[in-house]
Amino acid sequence: MQDRLDAAHEGLLENRREAIPSLSDPYGVPPAATIVVEDPREHFRGPDAWHRNVVATVFWVGEQPSQNNPTPNVASAWDQNWQENFGGYDHPDKRRGYLPADFHPSLNPFYVALPYNDIGRDGRHRPEAQSVIPWFWEDYRGDGISVCKDRWVFIHHEGKVCFAQWEDVGPFTTDHWQYVFGKESPRPNRNSNAGIDLSPAVRDYLGLRSGQQVEWRFIQDRDVPRGPWRSWADAPLNPVR
């Protein structure tokens, strides 16, 4: 009897000896952390950072649907209460300098929309987001929280420059990362292939009409200079022409 027990025990030990070398982690030690190194500087500087000859259209908080704007702007892609949080309807014609005439906004009136949403319909980041957005891990705050919202954009038009924050998605497209973060042109659309939407404040600062072309690129927060886009609470009453 004892001999059979000893033989069974020895067989068990032998099986364990054979199994342990085949285990990738026999002791359950957690794998080493993966270090992600991001160097987004190339997306903020140099000639390749610019998107050139891009048709710009004008949009605004509270804009109602129309033939060229099928989506109402009461909500944005990242703020279901955009108009309420902004403080009201950002009327494109009734202006007090760079601000709407009827109220003082609670959010920056210098805003833009670009045709990419990093959050999918399931409420989580799109699969490609972490690999195509150069600052993804730098700004990551959890799944489902946009790393694109509030990002600064540098806009140039006929010798004038303006700075604004990315607050909505469009025109028309929501997944064109190859253009927003790459070198593709905007996709064809019924607004002359527009690739960026500008707020009334940006329009007025640049002296631009909807349908004209601009150049734009991303810019890091620390590089955004002073101006009404920074201190919009103290924006001048009369636009600079």
Image: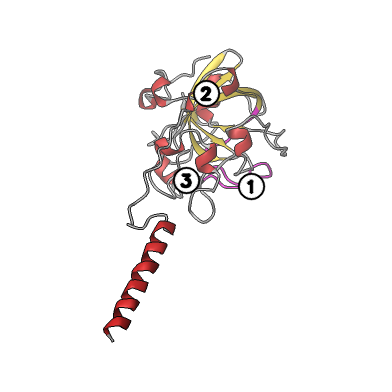
The amino acid on which the numbered mark 3 sits, given as a three-letter code, is Trp
The amino acid on which the numbered mark 2 sits, given as a three-letter code, is Glu
Q: Position of residue 35 (x, y in %)?
A: 40, 38
Q: Which mark is residue 116?
A: none
Classify mark 1: helix, strand or loop: loop
- Could you say which is closer to the camera, residue 235 or residue 13? 13
Q: Position of residue 173 (x, y in %)?
A: 63, 43
Q: Residues within 10 Å of mark 2 (few under 14, many from 20)?
A: few
Q: Of all residues shown, which one is farthest toward the front? A: 3
Figure check: 17 above or below 31: below
Give the residue at x 44% y 35%: 150
Give the residue at x 34% y 68%: 13
Indicate the quadrant where residue 220 lies: top left
Q: Of all residues shown, which one is farthest toward the bottom? A: 1
Task: Mark 1 vs mark 3: give the one in front.
Answer: 3
Tag 1 residue = 70
Label 1 and label 2: CA atoms lie apart by 35 Å
